[in-house]
Image (cartoon, grey):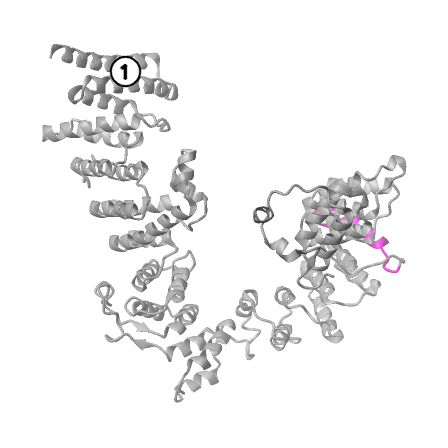
Amino acid sequence: MYSAPCTLREVALHELVRRPWVELQEYYGPVEMSKIAFEIVEDFYEASRRCTLPKLQRDIFSYLEIHYLHRISFTVYVQMFDNLMASKEFLGMRESFKCAMTRYDPEQGQIPPEIVYRFGITAAIELQDYKGVKTLMRDMEANGVKPSIEIVTRVMVAQATKGDLKTVVEAAKKLDTQDGRKWHEADVNRVITSLGLAGEPDLALDFFRRSQSRLTSKTLMKLLAVCRGNARPKHALALLANRRRFGVKMLPAQYPTLLEIVEELEIGGGPANELVLILQEMQDNDVSFNHRVHALIARNQELLNGTSFMLTPSLSQASDAHTERQPRTKEADVPLLNEFLNARKFAQAAAIVDSYVLPVSDDLKADDEHQEANKIPDEEGRIVPPWLSDMAVEAYSQNHEIDKVRSLLRGFKCVRGDFKHALSRIVGVYGGKGKQRDSRMAYDAFLAMQFQGLPIYRVRDALTRFKQNQDNEAAFVLFKQVSKRIGDALKDTKCIETATRQHDDFMGVLKKSDALKFDPARTVHDVLRIFLASKRLDLVFAALDQLESDGIPIRAVDYEDIFSTMTKTMGKDVSVYAVEDLMMVWEDMTGRGVSPNKAVLRLTIPALCGNENVCDIDQWTRRKIAVIQGYHLAAKDRFDNYVLPIASLSTLLEAAAETGSIEDVNAIHAGAVKALGTTMNKKHHSLADHSKILEAWNAIKKRKEATKSST
């Protein structure tokens, strides 16, 4: 009934689990179902259990709790306890306990069974609610429900963890595995763990002996953990000897911890040579060495001297280096290289790579427009076949042959090939924060990626390197790539429409959508600042053109970033930008149909409307008129809550009185008076300050009115 493809009552269970609820609703339609018959629910529950679909099993159990609570059997509760423990759904376990307790009323003689209490106590333990554990244990005792061994041992571990050691020891002394109750291996292991946490390793070992339990790999690991936590190397050696004596087989996942215990207790060397024996056992049983095992091997080279687990080449291997080389092939060397790298024998791996390395010759170099920019100015570059490049970088970097990695990198910058994994590895190793950090190599790797036409995903890191090296051209090449990604993401996610509805910044909406692995607004900001730092307004305008060509609307905040960077340099001893540069950017902004926001006005009013260093009156007048028009546009945006500073409003009002119309003056005066009230509240100015500013503004307005009436 429940064999593949797990179809029950014409419903494929695995398909039901895999498909999202929204998709199921679309497929089946908004069908309103009445209460499902208990027999049908029971069938689906049993099928989900037998087909090992734990999530579906939990969902069906929840349905049973809602609709058929009083018909849930003890067997189902036991099964669901195991399910919830395996999935670590301890909050769900507590809710199931509360729900189950509503079935019983002790005052009427309806006593909850042990399995129900097991739900509540175990959930309380895992949620570290020790007060709740004590309350439920007292409740069990008051109702005459005898705790099972499982509950008792779980509570013991919780008490030991919390530091109630005396209670744990007293409870352990009363336990007897031959008391007629059913003891499981897990129960014995919990008692051992609790006594180990209580600092009683002798009692833990004695309890195991009294339990007459079979030594399994799980129990062995619990006993060794007790030895580790209480510094008992001799006991650990005896346990390891018994493991071999009784032929206890370890699980692959247990070996790394086993090795670490042997290392920590310093029992890996002679006379037993436990470290070598365990490593050899792993090798014989085809257990793969993970990073923990490799790290342990590297730390214990003295104990592994003369064994096959040495990382450095032996003298005999070194003496063979002068012998005539045999022709090497990819088919033979790929598995050999993988073996050496997995075994952390980096010197041997690097020696194999050496036999493939070739100098970069003219016939290997790419013959295109990028070649001049990527030519090798000093040292000669070297190259390896693309299939070897990633392993070559790993072998050389792990063997600390940094010059050879640099030489390969120079080759990657002028010879085309599939080197993406090798370049990614170089960026990861030398561009991070580790001991091998090398900014120049990371920069060169990003340049090589661009030469190879590869996408760069570590955008912010790459921009940092380009900025450090003042490489505006590389930054622009990356920006074109990034701009296309932003444009594509905007089309796919419809963020512009969403932002318009929510009156939000579409770049912010795009960032929250997680459609990109980088912050789009931050990236645009960083690129513009790189160009501005080098006074490359041509690249600034080219970047804005690129955004428009990729369907990305230019925002007022983009110009805010530009003006902010430019104005920070103005007025200093060495000014990077002049007023004419600001006006050029302003005209670019209006030419693209972008209305300035109030923050842009704050940044530009002092320079464009101020009377410092005025040489050309006509140009000054033109600038003031442009800013006044910009103010009218900004004032129309009812979502722009930025309040212009008093100084900016005063300068703008003066400019309007000198250059603008009476309507301009009235509009700016009205806006300034409104802003003044807000500013005074925030700045806590006195009424005298308020009156003085208002009086000055009113005088400007009256002067303009008088000028108009006289004409």
Which residue range is magenta in the image? 160-178
**Outermost residue toward the bottom in this view:** 324
Q: Main secondary structure of the magenta part?
A: helix
* In this picture, residue 79 sits left or right of residue 664: right
Q: In the depicted view, which residue is nearer to us: 574 or 185? A: 185
* In this picture, residue 502 sits left or right of residue 2: left
* In this picture, residue 253 sits left or right of residue 475: right
Q: Determine the residue positioned at 41% across, 37% down.
A: 499
Question: Which quadrant holds residue 121?
Answer: top right
Q: Determine the residue positioned at 71% across, 45% down.
A: 62
- Report if residue 169 is visible in the image: no
Q: Is residue 485 above or below residue 594?
A: below
Residue 532 in percent (x, y) is at: 24, 44
Which of the image's four quarters has the C terminus?
Answer: top left
Q: Determine the residue positioned at 36% across, 20% down.
A: 678
Q: Determine the residue positioned at 40% across, 76% down.
A: 353
Which of the image's four quarters has the N terminus?
Answer: bottom right
User: Does residue 168 belong to the magenta stretch?
Assistant: yes
Residue highlighted by disc 1:
693
User: Does residue 150 belong to the magenta stretch?
Assistant: no
